[in-house]
Every structure is written in C-alpha cells, then in structure tokens.
Image (cartoon, grey):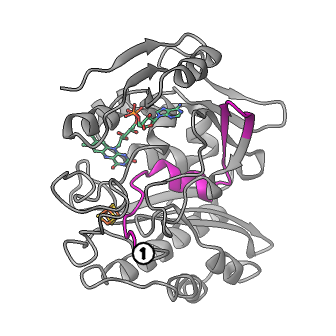
C-alpha cells in the first residue's frame, strides 16, 4: 500500500493551506467514494486533508430567503431537513434516491458533487480509460456501455455523472460556493460539472486546491412544486439509468416557470433548456409535456446498447410534469 500523510483541518483556512502544502493532496470527506478508489488504485493521494471537522455542517436560512447547505452536511441530514423537505422536495427526494441509508449517513454534500463516474473501465486499472489515464483510449465506447451517455458525449469519453443530488440542484438553480487559493467564488450548479470534450479527466470546473464550502438554494425556487424521479435496475440502492428533476410554476393556468434537468444521460446533469423553452407559456397538457421532452431529446446520440435511455427519460419527464401539474393545481402532492 502507498503511504500517505493525513491532516485533520479545523478551519477552511487550515484545510486550503494544508492542501497547498502537500503536492498530490486530496480533501477527504465521508470517504465513501475516495477511499474505494484508493483501494482500487485509481486514486493514490500523497496526503488526505480531512474536512469533516470543518464548521460547514449546518443548513441555514439566509436573509434573502435562500437556503445555504454547508459542504459537510451529511446526505441523510440534508434529505431530512424540514426546510429542504418543505421548500425543495426535489432535492430531498434526489438525495434519498441515492446510495443506502448507511452510506448517506457518512456521505457529505461536497463529496457527493465530486464523486467520480461509475464507468467500470474507469475503475479497472487493466482497461484503457481517457478519464483515468489520458490518451489511453476509451474502453466503453466499443465495449460495455449500456449505462453510458446519450447526450453531450465525445470521442474521448461517454461516461455519465452519477450524482442524484447534482441533478436536483441543476433544476432548482442552486449555486456551488468555493474557496481556494484565488479566493471565494460561487458558480451555478448548471455550470459546475463539465462535458468531456477532449479533457474527460476533468469532471468539473473546480480549480486546483479549491474547497466546496457549501451549496445555496435560491429563494426564487423555494416552495414551488418540485420532484425527482429515478429509474434504476433495482429498488434498493443503484445508480440511475435515467432520472429527472422538475420544478414547475403555473401562472393563470399556463406554465410560468419550468426547471427541468436529466440525470444519467450525460457527463453532467443535463439542464433541459429546449424543453423549458417549449413549456413556457404552454397549457400543462400531456401533449405539451411530450413535445417538450422530445424537443430536448432530439439531440440525443445514443450508442449501440443504450438507445432505451431516450424513451425512458422522455417518459420520466412526462410523468413528473403530469404529477407536478396536479400538485400545482390542487396544492396536494399526487
Ligand atoms: C455502493 C454505493 C452506491 C451509491 N449510490 C449512489 C447513488 O445512487 N446516487 C448518488 O448520488 N450517489 C451514490 N453513491 C455515492 C455516494 O453518495 C458518494 O460516495 C458520496 O456522496 C461521496 O461523498 P463523501 O462525503 O463520502 O465523499 P468522499 O469520498 O470523501 O470524496 C469524494 C470526492 O470529493 C472530494 N471532496 C469531498 N469533499 C470536498 C469538499 N468539500 N471540497 C472539495 N472536494 C471535496 C474528495 O477529494 C473526493 O475527490 C453511492 C456510493 C456507493 C459506495
Ligand atoms: S467512458 Fe470515460 S470513464 Fe469510461 S472508459 Fe471511456 S473515457 Fe473512461
């Protein structure tokens, strides 16, 4: 086993300084993904900077009505928080749809967003993978790719992003807060994860040494009907084959706001802007929902073995839009 240094940070400044002081460092949160990857030999950090003791473990309401979730809030606590359940049900449902109870007790908000793809070639050192070993090729493209991307993939990588939480954050117009050597910044959740292009080794726009300090959910989507639905191979824990998060507002019987994001279809949560455009101002009918989903998914380029994802995603979107319309009209979740 490769030796590594271990530093337990007590403040954000201590964490970022320790990271800067150790070449090849990684932040360690719940460890539910990073430690697995270390055991597989995919990750071999020279130092682990433990961030679990940082004072970032609360959910707080900000004066403008938005909600700030600290980076070390555990997935279980986030899903169960009354303000999250009440104002952003899609987020609570997405987190609960991920992993198992034990894993959610350990996993954190920041770690969930930065977990790596579950492409089996990425996790197998004996196989080519441009994400793990740039330039080595992509084993999945002509190999096993039933779970892989249908939108936004490249010749270099067809992986999907595995986080359920990230899909809900994209639909809800969440923002990711970061602190690092160049200071503090906040990026929209929709722009945090990347498409693979010719640099699949880079999953996100995070800069070297930056720490996720929290996630902010805006007042604008608070309290709107929202929901998350995930299709997977088994009812107990499994990663999504396709998923959808939707936020909907009806104004005088027509759609006044629709935020829609697909999961497990691309290298990042896929905010469905074309579908949203088609929905805006339309009456909330099944025909309008089908048309909107088809507008978005007409850009899909499925691979040999994952054509099924396109109708699956379409049906999930139509189902969730139908249920949310019922909620918006009656005030009751259907
Ligand atoms: C069997 C299994 C099934 C799962 N199923 C699902 C699922 O269905 N849906 C789903 O969404 N997830 C699923 N997960 C993933 C699980 O939710 C993640 O492993 C977890 O969220 C990662 O969180 P963590 O705190 O343990 O991160 P860690 O493993 O500690 O870290 C993950 C990455 O994030 C970095 N990191 C952590 N915190 C920060 C921070 N604050 N700032 C900067 N970098 C940071 C680490 O350096 C590392 O690169 C599953 C995991 C397992 C093992
Ligand atoms: S899809 Fe991406 S992660 Fe999977 S083998 Fe190809 S390059 Fe690697």
Residue at 71% x, 52% y: name it. 221
Q: Is residue 76 left or right of residue 208?
A: left
Please state the horizontal and vertical placement of residue 10, each as a whole percent of the image. 55, 10
Where residue 310 sits, quadrant-wise, is bottom left
Up-down relation of residue 285 to residue 23 (above or below): below
Q: Quadrant of the N terminus?
A: top left
In front: 228, or 50?
A: 50
Label 1 sits on residue = 313
Where residue 31 sits, quadrant-wise, is top left
In front: 105, or 55?
A: 55
Quarter of the render that holds ligand 1: top left
Q: Residue furthest right?
A: 64
Please state the horizontal and vertical placement of residue 187, each as a whole percent of the image. 70, 48
Would residue 72 be counted in the magenta stretch? no
Q: Is residue 26 left or right of residue 3?
A: right
User: Is residue 303 in view from this perspective?
Assistant: yes
Residue at 28% x, 55% y: name it. 122
Please state the horizontal and vertical placement of residue 136, each as a whole percent of the image. 29, 64
Up-down relation of residue 318 to residue 9 (above or below): below
Q: Which residues are magenta?
A: 156-185
Residue at 52% x, 56% y: name it. 167
Q: Residue furthest left?
A: 126
Would residue 166 be counted in the magenta stretch? yes
Please state the horizontal and vertical placement of residue 185, each as a whole percent of the image. 74, 39
Q: Secondary structure at mark 1?
A: helix
Residue at 49% x, 77% y: name it. 318
Where residue 159 sits, quadrant-wise, is bottom left
Q: Is residue 29 left or right of residue 238?
A: right
């Amino acid at each position: 086993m490769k030796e590594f240094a271990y530093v337990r940070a007590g403040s954000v400044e201590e964490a970022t300084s320790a990271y800067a002081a150790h070449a090849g460092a990684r932040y360690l949160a719940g460890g539910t993904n990073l430690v697995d990857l270390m055991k597989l030999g995919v990750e071999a950090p020279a130092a682990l900077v433990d961030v679990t003791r940082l004072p970032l473990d609360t959910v707080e309401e900000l004066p403008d009505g938005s909600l700030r979730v600290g980076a070390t809030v555990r997935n279980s606590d986030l899903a169960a928080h009354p303000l999250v359940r009440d104002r952003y049900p899609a987020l609570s449902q997405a987190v609960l749809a991920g992993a198992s109870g034990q894993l959610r007790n350990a996993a954190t908000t920041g770690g969930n967003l930065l977990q790596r793809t579950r492409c089996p070639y990425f996790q197998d050192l004996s196989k080519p993978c441009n994400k793990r070993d740039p330039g080595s090729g992509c084993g999945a493209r002509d190999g096993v790719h039933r779970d892989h991307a249908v939108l936004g993939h490249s010749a270099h990588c067809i992986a999907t992003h595995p986080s359920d939480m990230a899909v809900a954050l994209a639909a809800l117009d969440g923002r990711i807060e970061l602190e690092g050597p160049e200071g503090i910044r906040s990026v929209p959740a929709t722009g945090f994860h990347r498409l693979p292009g010719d640099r699949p080794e880079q999953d996100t726009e995070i800069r070297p040494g930056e720490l996720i300090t929290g996630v902010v959910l805006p007042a604008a989507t608070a309290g709107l009907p929202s929901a998350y639905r995930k299709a997977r191979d088994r009812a107990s824990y499994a990663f999504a084959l396709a998923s959808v998060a939707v936020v909907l507002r009806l104004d005088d019987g027509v759609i006044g706001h629709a935020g829609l994001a697909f999961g497990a279809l691309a290298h990042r949560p896929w905010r469905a802007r074309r579908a949203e455009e088609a929905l805006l101002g339309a009456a909330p009918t099944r025909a309008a929902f089908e048309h909107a989903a088809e507008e978005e998914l007409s850009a899909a380029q499925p691979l040999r073995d994952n054509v099924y994802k396109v109708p699956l995603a379409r049906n999930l979107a139509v189902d969730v839009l139908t249920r949310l319309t019922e909620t918006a009209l009656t005030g009751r979740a259907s």
